[in-house]
Image (cartoon, helix red, strand yellow):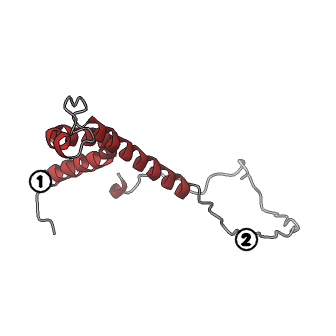
Amino acid sequence: MYFCNRKQRNNLKKYIIIFLSCMLLLPSFGSFFVYTSFKLNQEEISKTICVQRKMVFNSCNGRCELQKSLKKYADNEKRMQNNLKEKAEVVYIQNTTTTNFKLVTLIESKAKIFASFDKKPISVSKATFRPPSNFI
């Protein structure tokens, strides 16, 4: 039972493909998100969190916090990559059974492999083979 028509299903498939593609690309934009959130909150960061906020001629403007955030993000990424490497280095062991083959004597066949061409054919097929239509 379908709840939507073919066009709606195709649109839904497109949206799912776009969503999954964005989810795959999302980790590569991590530092961009850190920088964007810094730029959006730069004034508040420079007034409240910045180490040099009490200095008269503050040229930092919260960039020290941006550097800390980027370093924290990079360390987190490195840790995640190390975890993935550890998981990828798992050794898989497969138990295989060995079969002992015994040498069997050959059986000689007295049947003729090739038909003799001196006799007339018994029957002739006029129909050609056609595969069933449901496979096409």
The three-letter amino acid code for the residue at tag 1 is Gln
x, y percent for residue 12:
17, 53
Image mark count: 2
**Residue placed most toward the observer, 132 or 89:** 89
Query: Which sits earlier in the primary sequence, circle 1 or circle 2?
Result: 1
**Residue placed most toward the observer, 12 or 52:** 52
The three-letter amino acid code for the residue at tag 2 is Thr
User: What residue is shown with label 1?
Assistant: 8
Marks 1 and 2, Cα distance to the nearest angstrom?
52 Å
Q: Is residue 2 left or right of residue 121?
A: left
Q: Is residue 54 above or below residue 108?
A: above
Q: Is residue 115 left or right of residue 127?
A: right
Classify residue 134 by image quadrant.
Answer: bottom left
Q: Secondary structure at mark 2?
A: loop
Residue drawn at x 40%, y 43% as measured from the top left: 74
Q: Secondary structure at mark 1?
A: helix
Q: Is residue 127 visible?
A: no
| Res 35 label | none
User: What residue is shown with label 2?
Assistant: 97
